[in-house]
Image (cartoon, rainbow, N blue to C red):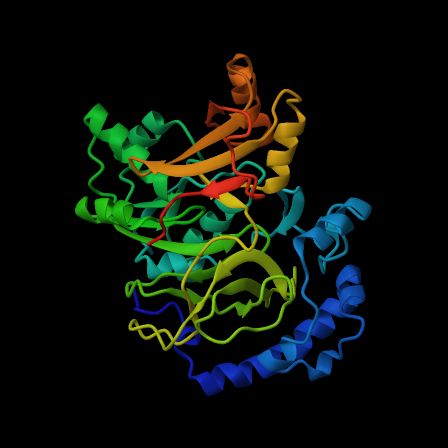
Amino acid sequence: MTHYYDDLEVRSADQRKDDLAQQLPGLFAHAKANAPALAQHLKDVDASAITDLDALSRVPVLRKSALQESQKANPPFGGFAALPVSQYAQIFQSPGPIYEPGQMGHDWWRAARFVHACGIGEGDIVQNCFSYHLTPAGMMFENGARAVGAAVVPAGTGQSELQAQAASAIGVTAYAGTPDFLKTILDSGAEQGLDLARITKAAVSGGALFPSLRQEYSDRGIACRQCYATADLGNIAYESEAMEGLIVEEGVLIEIVTPGTGDPLSAGEVGEVVVTTLNKDYPLIRFATGDLSTVVPGDSPCGRTNMRIQGWMGRADQTAKVRGMFIRPEQVAALVASHPEVQRIRVVISRDEERDVMTVQAEASEAIAETIEASLQDILKVRGRVEIVEPGSLPNDGMVIDDQRSYD
């Protein structure tokens, strides 16, 4: 296996700039001609004038809320997709809800560079533990693994005992999934006396890869690397063997902007991640992710030359990710509304033994604690425990989601 996936990863800055000047006008013209909602969003934009990042920065930002509203009025894609619905292979759903198209074409979600950077290729068997249910994550990583010539076990989520048994029996050499679940499989394998030593590579996303967990995998002989991806955009940036920031994927453009404005920030400043995809099937342009990050100066020591970002550094709002699922302030409001006896709620997210823990603090009586806990899965989509606190004891500071995890 060659060190780099392709020559695009090691282009000079001048070559990347020249290539961008060739691609951007065509992308904008195609979007305006084939995606009606984008045409309306970009009605004041001259496609031929968008030839560099400076020109791109003056284009209006597209937010998820706009996508959602358009999809309600014009399902399923709200006029932002550039092909008829029948020409997509799949339709996925992510929280919101928001619906995304998918294709079976070669590396459609651009996961292959990341998978390759993890050292995965021909001869590897990847146990893909990303969800295949409604979300595109499972297909996204299967698509990338197949693009580099690896075989895939479409394992999905849950059933850790069976997962460990399958990994041992098949001879799985690589894992793909959320950071925590690999530990669950390995621990289950150890309890069952199974040999999982052939797993030496891990490609993770969908949650924070904490340094202590990465070290635990390293101690077991597993090289674990992470990428930053979303259901809307596919793979955005990925880690290489250098493990110094995340390298921006060649099929997207990233800007770090002042949250809520779209105005670019100087290198080193923390701001909202805004992404433009170069995928003409679904050309999201200046799409605001709501995630925070910052640019890492210089090139990666691995030799890849594209921009690097620090990785996920939190949310521009209070939204947090717990065990791969987003928890949003509006969901907490719905939880409170469903229990009239509750005066105030705060969701506290912490870590225990390398796993996310969600505790819902509620100003209410002990008598309804079980009722609240039973509704967490339906409303917040994540299981947790309920802690009853005295009325008036939660701070009146507007915070409803308190993420206490350390990302250092």
**In the picture provided, is 247 more to the left or to the right than 84?**
left
Residue furthest out toward the top? 367
Asked if residue 171 shows in the view, the reply is yes
Quarter of the figure with residue 253: bottom right
Question: Which of 231/81 is in front?
Answer: 231
Relative to 216, does residue 50 appear above or below in the rendering?
Answer: below
Relative to 367, does residue 389 appear above or below in the rendering?
Answer: below
Give the image location of residue 25, x and y in percent: 67, 79
Question: Which of 36/296 is in front?
Answer: 296
Question: Which of 394/235 is in front?
Answer: 394
Residue at 63% over, 29% down: 336
**In the picture provided, is 281 more to the left or to the right than 8?**
right
Quarter of the figure with residue 216: top left
Residue at 22% over, 25% down: 191
Give the image location of residue 29, x and y in percent: 73, 74
Asked if residue 108 shows in the view, the reply is no
Residue at 52% over, 83% down: 17
